[in-house]
Image (tube, helix red, strand yellow):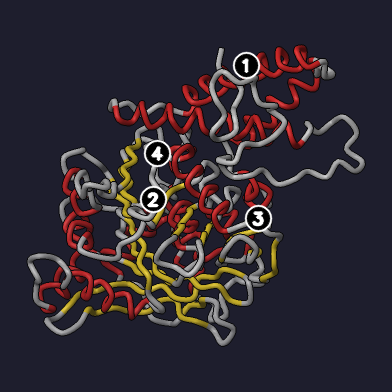
């Protein structure tokens, strides 16, 4: 049985400290619950704070010991350990209250207290209410009391403070990194940046020490938008483009999706990949896991998920995207997908596209389909080989079939342009913009035809109806 947490400096032989009083070294303080109107349904906040302080401290020490021993305890093991710690704490609480003659908690109150502690310990605490809001896409925390929320219509509003001080916010971030990431990531002065994927699929970036105040940026994804029909229903594209996308994926064309931050690139790639026939083997490579294809096991029974690894505090153990891409070529993948290309890994991606992995996809930051070619060329120049621009243009021209641009317009994510790559020279990539931006910004047929051979033939064989490109205004009204 573990002893109750004691205030700093208390002698081990002293009577046990009251667990209702949080100790000075408590890890992030739990936000105070309003008791007004709660009745007996909420656990006493002072007891919850004491239990959380003890639970988080015990778990942090245990996780660190496991990591040093080369073990990476999973979620089930962590929860089992947490339940044991809670049980010991509750027993110590009951014994302490019996000794001092304080009222005992009934079974229902103990169950509520234990359940609340587990919920906070395996969540993000004060941020959880934001993460569970299906209307939000972004959460910006600039210090403990400067919180901004962005909804799916692009509207921005202030949120409630998440901590009483910046030190408390840092402890919250540290706890999230240590417990919610599968490898237990550090966050301190020597490791002032934290990048990780949250259990709900969101992406978290946090920074301290090199910023005026600790900052957290969280990007949330809509799990309900996972099929092309759902994206069409949301207004991202019309039925002609939906038909084209499905056929392009089934026909095995290599596609680059470009756009700005928060434009919907990852959402689009996820939906495109969910059109891949289930018998095909997909390998995804990402900096932080965002695509989440492993959540669609019925659609992708044969899938491999790879995530880049940053170096440890000694500067060793890094496994970057370009190294993962080299390994992909040995995994007999039908399709290789790179979550986001933004550096030397572009070479591995382009080589994979030209090495038999037809139907591969990647995303890139670019403001238009035309600019995407220059971005790819610039990234290729960052490789150790420092290939010439002429070589890169030729490589892009032979590897990429289509470039798609997505943009947030008036709070709605829309496809604005689709460009077919038809060749290359030593000075540029040759392409035709087959869907162009309309005056309103959304994509409409440009009048430029798709190449009859092999593009149109392969698309038609995969189910695309070329007649859908006959309306200059598109099918946005139908």
Label 2, label 3: how far apart the Cα atoms are: 30 Å
Q: Nearer the viewer, mark 4 or mark 3?
A: 3
Q: Residue at x 59, y 83 (%)?
A: 440
The tag on residue 439 is: none
First in sequence: mark 4 or mark 2?
A: 4
Measured in 3D between alpha carbons, the distance from the residue under mark 1 to the one under mark 2, in whole angstroms, is 35 Å
For the residues carrying marks 1 and 2, which lies nearer the camera in this image? 1
Residue 164's disc number: 3
**Image quadrant containing the N terminus:** top right
Residue 37 in view here: yes
Q: Which of the marked residues, 1 or 4, is nearer the chain's N terminus? A: 1
Residue matched to label 4: 184
- Does dot 3 land on a helix, a strand or a loop? loop
Q: Can residue 149 be seen in this view?
A: no
Q: Quadrant of residue 293?
A: top left
Q: In front here: 194 or 327?
A: 194
Q: In this view, does 136 lie above or below 333?
A: below
Tell me which label, 1 or 3, sits earlier in the chain. 1
Say few, some or many: other residues with alpha carbon within 10 Å of mark 4 (under 14 / 14 to 19 / 20 or more).
many
Residue most toward the bottom? Answer: 439
Nearer to me, 367 or 114: 114
Between discs 4 and 3, the one toward the N terminus: 3
The residue depicted at 33 percent of the width and 80 percent of the height is 371
Q: Name the residue under label 2.
A: 288
Percent of width and height locating residue 420: 32, 72
């Amino acid at each position: 049985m573990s002893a109750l947490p004691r205030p700093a400096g208390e002698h081990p032989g002293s009577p046990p400290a009251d667990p209702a009083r949080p100790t000075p070294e408590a890890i992030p303080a739990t936000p105070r619950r309003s008791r007004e109107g709660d009745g007996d349904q909420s656990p006493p906040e002072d007891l919850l704070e004491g239990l959380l302080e003890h639970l988080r401290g015990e778990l942090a020490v245990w996780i660190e010991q496991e990591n040093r021993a080369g073990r990476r305890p999973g979620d089930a093991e962590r929860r089992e350990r947490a339940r044991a710690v809670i049980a010991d704490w509750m027993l110590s609480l009951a014994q302490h209250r019996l000794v001092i003659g304080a009222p005992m908690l009934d079974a229902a109150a103990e169950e509520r207290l234990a359940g609340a502690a587990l919920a906070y310990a395996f969540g993000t605490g004060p941020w959880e209410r934001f993460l569970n809001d299906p209307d939000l896409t972004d959460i910006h925390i600039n210090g403990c009391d400067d919180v901004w929320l962005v909804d799916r219509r692009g509207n921005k509003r202030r949120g409630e403070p998440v901590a009483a001080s910046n030190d408390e916010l840092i402890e919250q971030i540290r706890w999230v990194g240590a417990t919610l990431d599968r490898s237990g990531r550090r966050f301190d002065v020597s490791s002032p940046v934290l990048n990780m994927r949250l259990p709900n699929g969101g992406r978290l970036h946090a920074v301290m020490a090199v910023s005026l105040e600790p900052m957290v940026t969280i990007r949330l994804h809509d799990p309900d938008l996972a099929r092309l029909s759902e994206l069409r229903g949301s207004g991202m594209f019309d039925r002609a483009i939906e038909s084209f996308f499905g056929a392009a994926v089934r026909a095995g064309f290599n596609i680059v999706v470009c756009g700005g931050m928060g434009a919907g690139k990852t959402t689009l790639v996820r939906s495109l990949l969910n059109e891949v026939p289930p018998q095909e083997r997909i390998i995804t490579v990402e900096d932080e896991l965002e695509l989440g294809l492993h959540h669609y096991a019925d659609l992708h029974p044969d899938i491999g998920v790879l995530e880049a690894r940053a170096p440890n505090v000694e500067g060793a153990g890094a496994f970057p995207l370009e190294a993962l891409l080299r390994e992909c070529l040995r995994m007999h993948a039908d399709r290789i997908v790179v979550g986001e290309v933004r550096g030397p890994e572009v070479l591995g991606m382009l080589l994979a596209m030209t090495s038999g992995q037809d139907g591969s996809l990647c995303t890139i930051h670019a403001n238009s389909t035309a600019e995407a070619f220059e971005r790819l060329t610039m990234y290729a120049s960052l490789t150790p080989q420092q290939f010439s621009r002429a070589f890169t243009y030729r490589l892009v021209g032979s590897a990429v079939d289509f470039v798609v641009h997505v943009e947030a317009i008036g709070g709605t994510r829309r496809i604005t342009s689709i460009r077919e790559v038809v060749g290359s020279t030593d000075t540029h990539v040759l392409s035709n913009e087959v869907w162009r931006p309309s005056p309103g910004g959304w994509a409409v047929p440009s009048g430029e035809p798709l190449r009859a051979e092999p593009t149109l033939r392969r698309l038609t064989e995969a189910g695309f109806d070329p007649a859908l490109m006959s309306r200059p205004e598109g099918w946005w009204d139908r």
